[in-house]
Image: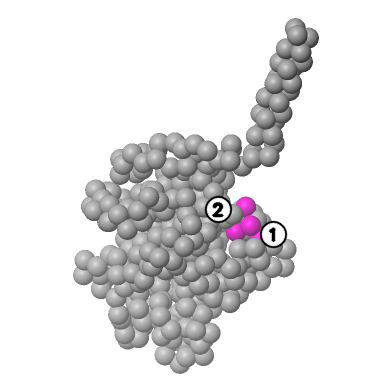
Amino acid sequence: MEKKIKVILLLLVVLAVAGVATHMFLTPSTVETVGSKNVTDMIGRDIEIPASVSNVVATSPPMTTVLYMIAPDKLKAVNFQWTDDEMKYVPSQYQNYPVVGGWYGTQDGSYEEFIASEPDIVIESIDEGGDGDSSTVNERQEKFGTIPVIAVKDTTNVEKVSESITFMGEIVGAQDKAKELNDFNQKYLDIVHDRSSKLSDSDKVKVYYAQGDDGLQTTPSHSTHGQLIDLIGGENVADSVAQGNTTGGVQVSIEQVLSWNPDKIITNDPEFYAKVYSDSNWGKLDAVKNKEVYLSPQSPFKWFDRPVGANMIIGVPWTAKILYPDDYKDINMVDTTKEFYSNFYHFDLSDNQAKEILLDSGLKESNL
């Protein structure tokens, strides 16, 4: 009898061990994904989110851009469709994100489509001050139900974006990539801060930012859209028509632009760029006569504007090379472009591809 009891006990132990092993080895994903953590967002809301965030969407392009740069495999939707040109340097695995709209200039977001992308969290942009957007964040949270909405400070200013990039990296588990992006940005900010601070008023080049297919919309200084001109130390010729408007664009006439006669012109519009050198009116400008018109590279995000945000980080050295080529000869834009695209756009450019991007933007080969 005693021997039988020992055998039964031994069998029970074996079965128990086998049961634990079966649980460990047959259901690893369940064991690993169970759990949550509490975080405080950037307007002080305490929120419970999954311990490991795998799927994330954002309600505006600047936030989506950061997510694409630091955690593209966790991004599950974008706010607008890339054009064929913008798609040129997007890896194939990222070319088919669903388009869910958003709440920014177009206000075309679809809660149903956002929810259908099955995000673990939703990133919502707030103004730098934060408090004024708490009602919007609360409204989003109500509409998204149990999906946590995380408020993150506006990332549209390249000089102030680091805190938000760091925070988003912590939220989505991409701390190292977020630090790498901030380090790249700070490197060039330090360079241009130092050199622009030494410019006298007489040293500053006059710059016109041409928007629209006719080039006759622009933005004055202190606008997020033309911020790189200010940062590098250019003189934005449109200041005289600002009239307190530092956010939206202003309409001007060709006569007004002729009276300013800028040294350099920067544009985001390929249609305008394609015809500016053959237009007799624009041809009267020194910038056109001297072949000093530049088109922001477009792919996969524009370097200079539209959207404003972390995509403009690579635009800092590019704009510096345009405005003051002699002061920035030590920056190799081919190497800089390859580094940025490889690390943050997840696409390895050849030397020739990097040169093509830069030459197509108007930079001279001697200034690469």
Residue 229 image point, x, y percent: 41, 63
Instruction: Say left or right for 185 vs 210.
Output: right
Q: Nearer the viewer, residue 332 or 348?
A: 348
Residue positioned 47% across, 50% down in the render: 120
| Residue found farthest to the bottom | 280
Residue 74: image tag: 2
Residue occupied by mark 1: 348
Res. 26 in view: yes
Q: Which residues are magenta?
A: 343-347
Q: Amino acid at mark 1?
A: Asp
Residue 125 image point, x, y percent: 36, 55
- Residue 78 position (above or below residue 152): below
- Residue 15 position (above or below residue 205): above
Q: CA distance from mark 1 to mark 2?
A: 20 Å
Q: Nearer the viewer, mark 1 or mark 2?
A: 2
- Residue 208 position (above or below residue 76): below
Residue 9: image tag: none
Q: Residues within 10 Å of mark 2 (few under 14, many from 20)?
A: some
Q: Nearer the viewer, residue 162 or 208?
A: 162
